[in-house]
Image (tube, helix red, strand yellow):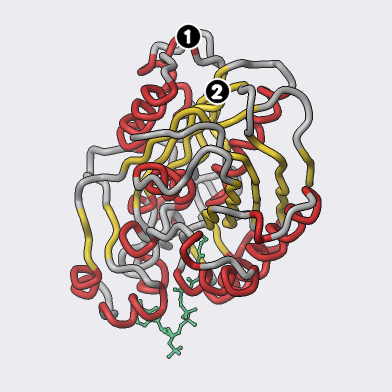
Amino acid sequence: MIGTANGYRVSITGIGGNAPERVMTNEELSQLVDTSDEWIVVRTGIHERRIAREDEALSDIALPAVQDALEMAGVSGPELDLIVCATVTPDMAFPATAALIADRLGSSEAAAYDLSAGCTGFMYGIAQAYGMLAGGVCRRALVVGGDVLSKIVDWSDRATCIVFGDGAGAVVMERVEQGGFMGFELGADGSGGMQLYLPAGGSREPTSSATVAAHGHFVHMNGREVFKFATRVLVSSAEKLLDQLGLTVDDIDLYVPHQANIRIIKHAVERLGIPEEKVVINVDRYGNTSSGSIPLALADAVRERRVHKGDIVLMTGMGAGLTWGSGVMEWTEEMAA
Ligand code: UT7
């Protein structure tokens, strides 16, 4: 789907990012699997990632980001009327982590649900919240994107465990007078679903001792195929949306791509023709945090004062599904973390 803004203007009015304290270096990983710091840096650009403690779940990692976002927006938990949590690693299959977050925030008036669109989840989440805000169904939304992939990664599989990390970001979205979201382009190609999936634990293959023994509860990824898909859609999705909006890459002030692999980002940047100084990159420090990737990177950019009132921001995500999604917005006001 592709669409341009219609209805009330809607923007991000607060943002926060958070990752667990524990840092895992490539050196440490090379003690676990047959790999090296050099291989990981050359093939992915990742130097280190954050890993959750055993007792840390998604909501624990997301809450500090949520609190920062609410504080920046000057919105309290009870004032929220929508909470969307994009993740593939909720605290538990149900209830929704969004409902658990609502409880922690005292958001008793809010609709709260989780959304599953792999690493694209945050883009889908902000597009949904946009629709509800622009259509006047709600006034103050919180969109959380976050994952704790360390809990579902096979730590004996060197082709996947080196790529992922844990982290979360959150944005408050509200109606505004100026700027805001200009449009979205989102899509899914289920024929590629088995390129990146978690086989067991659902209704297709319920949990059993056999699924556990077969490593069915871990991420399975065909890295090369996902890589090809990523390089294609990061470019095509952005181009389609810019074209629909009557914009060119020269209009973009800040580009926030999904932080999957530095080679994927560089390919997109080159093909789109966006100057490097406009690109937000933190994959070197966090790895691929899935749904946490884009809000964490955007939160970094805000903290570093790289985004200003009136700037045009392009975000594009891709991931399991296979899914992809882009959004373009005009930044509404100066923000300081
Ligand atoms: O958010 C969306 C989710 N995922 C992604 O975006 C991931 C997209 N894919 C990738 O980033 C890359 O495909 C990887 C980083 C996962 C792998 O890099 P690659 O350049 O595609 O490597 P490859 O899978 O083609 O493997 C090349 C070689 C293989 O050896 P042979 O068959 O050529 O002898 C692998 O066995 O590298 C080997 N290899 C490793 N060697 C050292 C694979 N993983 C490792 C490793 N350390 N960790």
Answer left or right for 325 relative to 52. Answer: right
**Could you tell me how far apart the alpha carbons at marks 2 and 1 are, in whole angstroms?**
13 Å
Which of label 2 and label 1 is nearer to you? Answer: 2
Q: Position of residue 165 (x, y in %)?
A: 35, 56
Q: Say which quarter of the image contains residue 272.
A: bottom right
55 w.r.t. 312: above or below: above
Q: What residue type is disc 2 on?
A: Ala
Which circle's residue, 2 or 1, is located before the other in the chain? 1
Residue that appears at 58% across and 48% down:
313
Assign ligand 1 to one image quadrant. bottom left
Residue that appears at 77% across and 48% down:
245
Label 2 CA crowd tier, 10 Å (few <14, some 14–19, many 20+): many
Q: Element type at marker 1?
A: loop
Q: Which residue is mark 2?
A: 141
Q: Element type at marker 2?
A: strand
Q: Which mark is residue 108?
A: 1
Residue that appears at 72% across and 22% down:
8
Q: Is residue 92 visible?
A: no
